[in-house]
Image: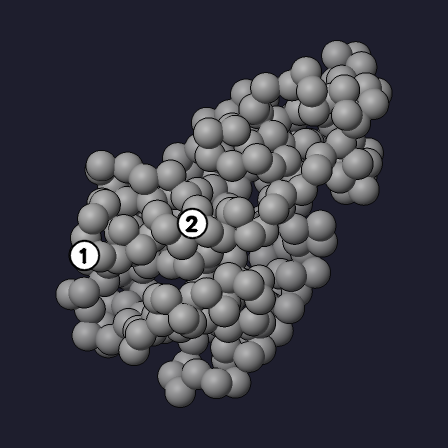
Amino acid sequence: MKQKIIQALPPKLFLAIKKWGWYGDFPDWESAKKHTKGYDDGTILDKVKNSLLKVKNGQAVYERDSVLFDKIEYSWEVLAGLMWIAAKNKGALNLIDFGGSLGSTYFQNKYFLDFLDSVSWNIVEQENFVEEGVNSFEDDRLKFYNSIEECIVNNSQTINCILLSCVLPYIEHPFELLNTIFKYKIQYIIVDRTGFTLNGKTRITAQIVPAKIYDASYPCRFFNEEDFIDVFEKNGYEQIVCFPALDKINIPSEYKGFIFKLKS
């Protein structure tokens, strides 16, 4: 009942009285979208770029969502998965980081990645992020592309992993994206920082970002875990491991990560 009252508020009033967090249980993506205002791509891009340039240049240690930290908060499970995949591929990690910003996860794990024999870290992002990535961050290991297809076609090495970190909840049609990924038969898929409901029902919310980070709000989905895993299994992937993710939020949910392997 409380959630129905919340989402019945006029969109402007909804945004005016709510603090940062996740709210509502909307019937569809479009309904949640009406209660959010999106974000200024340029503002977010500039904040992320300025923060990551400090990390790249050694002036800061770690960036997440444009916020700088003086200590790296690792997802050890993700890092272990990356090292395991490289070990199974003769020391080579050839990865697509879908929705990877300007390289947040790459720089987060760079100290360990530098010990591998070969690293090809390919980020697929929105056009403005790709343009900035190419201009300010691209090198012989870190590349930027507008689509998965473009990345695969232009990559001289076979992609052996795709990373989906905190991205599927923010896509209107996440299973369409997964179906696109499945058709490339990539050996390993790592999912991280993805929310699941506790009652078994998919839930679509409106997320309001803390103003100190940037001024933004957008729809965010929490999945039914059983249905989510089933999609991978039906497309030939087996679950290797499930692990708790770093995120803690204000509604009943669990944030998790998974490593899936394409069955032989």
Crowd rating for badge 1 (residues with CA inside 10 Å; few <14, some 14–19, many 20+): few
Mark before the other along the chain sequence, 1 or 2: 2
| Residue that badge 2 annotates | 48
Residue 161 versus residue 216 in the image, above or below: below
> Does dot 1 land on a helix, a strand or a loop?
helix
> Does dot 2 land on a helix, a strand or a loop?
helix
For the residue pair 211 and 142, the one nearer the viewer reads as 211
For the residue pair 55 and 140, the one nearer the viewer reads as 55
Q: Residue at 70%, 24% (x, y): give it.
A: 15
Q: Where does residue 244 sit, x and y in percent of width and height?
A: 41, 36
Residue 18 versus residue 90 in the image, above or below: above
Is 130 placed left or right of 95 in the picture? right
Q: Where does residue 164 sit, x and y in percent of width and height?
A: 49, 55
Is 188 placed left or right of 229 in the picture? left
Q: Where does residue 171 sit, x and y in percent of width and height?
A: 65, 51
Q: Residue at 42%, 49% (x, y): give it.
A: 48
- Residue 111: assigned label: 1
